[in-house]
Amino acid sequence: MLHPWRVQGRPRPADHARGGREHGHAGPGDRLGRRPPPPPRLRRPRRRSALPVVLRHHTAQRFAPDLLADRDIARVDRRFPALTVLTLLAPALIGGLATMSWSGAVTVFFWASLVRVAVLHHVTWSVNSLCHLIGDRPYAARDKSANFWPLAIASMGESWHNSHHADPTGARHGVRRGQLDISARIIWLFEKAGWATDVRWPKPERLADKLNPGYAPGLGRGVRDPR
Ligand SMILES: [Zn+2]
């Protein structure tokens, strides 16, 4: 569950980003700081396109044209139905083969497919709901976004949501002392390996400008470019 939209060149499916943008994230630009290019000419829908597909494509065109224009992400986006089937059935297959039983297949399907996907979705939605209701607000943001520590590990750092809204393009959301941000660490590793480029690490001076009264700067070590 790496959140590669924090890194240039490694985006995630357009739908995902679209969800965030509809929710008011990252405004017209995204976390990469890029503003979307003007929407490309709409392709004529294929004959077999059902209405939901057309609507979905239209929404993605509206909210994430830059991501749709990205070759890698378009490829993942196109294969999303097949990937969904794979991610649900592969655990069941492994469970069945490992135990050579149907009950093994069903048990693993329940925990490793259904429960896993349900938990993932609930964590994601919680970031966009709970993290606008409760938590700490060290930075000024135009919304009620808050840093909610209980979700830090489950959300891999996304629940430092106040910091995210204060500095939407930052690759690290856990900018304050002691705030664990697993995604930021993975991005850092990818950067070291040369797979991620132009990573936007948070700038202390930018964060200092947005500090709410009563809060000490309290920035963590990882805030400065860790290279
Ligand atoms: Zn939010």
Image (cartoon, rainbow, N blue to C red):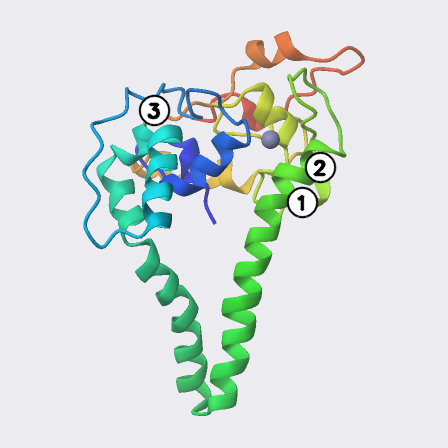
Q: Residue furthest right?
A: 214
Q: Which class describes the residues within 10 Å of circle 2: few (<14), some (14-19), or many (20+)? A: many
Q: Quadrant of the C terminus?
A: top left
From the top left corner, tell me how far across and down residue 6 is, in percent.
43, 32
For ligand 1, which image quadrant applies?
A: top right
Quarter of image, res 126: top right
Q: Earlier in the sequence, mark 3 or mark 2?
A: 2
From the top left corner, tell me how far across and down residue 146 is, in percent.
70, 29
Residue 132 is at least partly visible in this image:
yes
Q: Residue at x 43, y 23 (%)?
A: 200
Frontmost of labels 1 and 3 is 1
**Ligand 1 within 8 Å of the CB at mark 1:** no
Residue 127 lies, with reference to residue 84, above or below; the image says: above
SS state under label 2: loop
Identify the residue position indicated by label 2 in the image. 148
- Residue type at tag 1: Leu
Quarter of image, res 182: top right
- Residue type at tag 2: Phe
Identify the residue position indicated by label 3 in the image. 198
Mark 2 touching mark 1, by CB under 8 A? yes
- Distance from Cα at disc 3 to Cα at disc 2: 28 Å
Identify the residue position indicated by label 1 in the image. 151
* Residue toward you, 140 or 128: 128
Q: Residue at x 27, y 25 (%)?
A: 39
Mark 3 touching mark 2, by CB under 8 A? no
* Residue toward you, 128 or 108: 128
In the image, taking residue 198 as reference, residue 201 lies left or right, namely right
